[in-house]
Amino acid sequence: MILISGDVHSQYHVINEQIRHAEKFTGRTLDAVIILGDFGIYEQPLHRYFDKEGGHFLRKLYFIDGNHEEFCQFDHLVEKYSHHLNHLSRGKVTQICNGRFLSLGGARYMDALNSPSGSEIRDCDIARCLAHRADEVDFVLTHDCPAGIGVPNAPGMEFYGNPGFERGEELIEHFKPKKWFFAHYHRWFSGKIGESEFFGLPESWKGFGLLDEQGNYQAVEHAVEKREDWLQRFIKKLFSL
Ligand SMILES: [Fe+2]
């Protein structure tokens, strides 16, 4: 059984709380956790959680990159915390339990704030995916969703254009995956194109998905309290001086 989670945005403590809830809910021990990007690879909160607070995850954790990560230090931080985190790079197929997962982190360009250099999905990332044979892949993991699957725009976000990244339909056509999981839009979604099912997940503190050994998927709503993040603490400290 694998727990699939949406954006974490450096609220790392949420992961263990959702693992505990999932194990209580199912009466089973989870085999792994997969985070669908925006885990929050930033030096400051990683240092605080792992080095200062001695944090660790209860189950093996895999993640793809999103658009809110510290890309200028990404490889260094992933290496530094590699005993806690397993990065699924773009265009790679990884066996997790008995499923074969194609990973494609990153997102379509939104704006300079939401799309730091390194976050955009490039043609070479798509090409790396398409280099795999269709029969090598069961499931697809992306942060953004493929364009045209019916994910609605969030109210007030219309100026970013229609949701989704281009060339996603080439991946759908090539792989015809059983299931495709994504996050980024901060809301639940489900849809179907041909034999492929698409599932969007909200932020990690609102719930998660469970994927069993037979490939059955279930969405579980479960709210977890957020903590003040490092930026809020920094601002508070700044104004208390
Ligand atoms: Fe995102």
Image: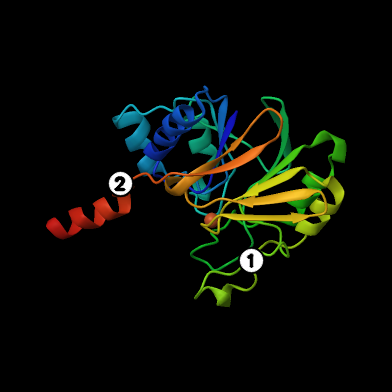
Q: Which residue lies most toward the left here?
A: 241
Residue denoted by label 2: 227
Q: Which residue lies most toward the top here?
A: 29
44 displayed left or right of 95: left
Crowding near the residue tagged with mark 2, few <14, some 14–19, many ≥20 C-alpha atoms within 10 Å: few
16 displayed left or right of 136: left
**Ligand 1 within 8 Å of the CB at mark 1:** no
Instruction: Find numbered disc 2 in the image and state the secondary structure of the residue it sits on.
Output: loop
What percent of the width, then of the height, locates residue 169? 80, 58
Can residue 142 be seen at all in this image of the molecule? no
In the picture, residue 98 is in which quadrant?
top right
What percent of the width, then of the height, locates residue 199? 64, 50
- Of residue 226 and residue 69, the one placed in the foreground of this image is 226
135 displayed left or right of 45: right
Residue denoted by label 1: 163
Q: Which quadrant holds the N terminus?
A: top right
Q: In the displayed structure, would residue 113 be above or below residue 105? A: below
Q: Earlier in the sequence, mark 2 or mark 1?
A: 1
Can residue 230 be seen at all in this image of the molecule? yes
Q: In the displayed structure, would residue 11 be above or below residue 87? A: below
163 displayed left or right of 186: right
For marks 2 and 1, give the CA distance. 29 Å
Amino acid at dot 2:
Arg
Instruction: Find numbered disc 1 in the image and state the secondary structure of the residue it sits on.
Output: loop
- Residue at the spot x=30%, y=46% of the render? 227
- Of residue 55 and residue 69, the one placed in the foreground of this image is 55
What percent of the width, then of the height, locates residue 180? 70, 47
Q: Quadrant of ligand 1?
A: bottom right
- Of residue 196 and residue 231, the one placed in the foreground of this image is 196
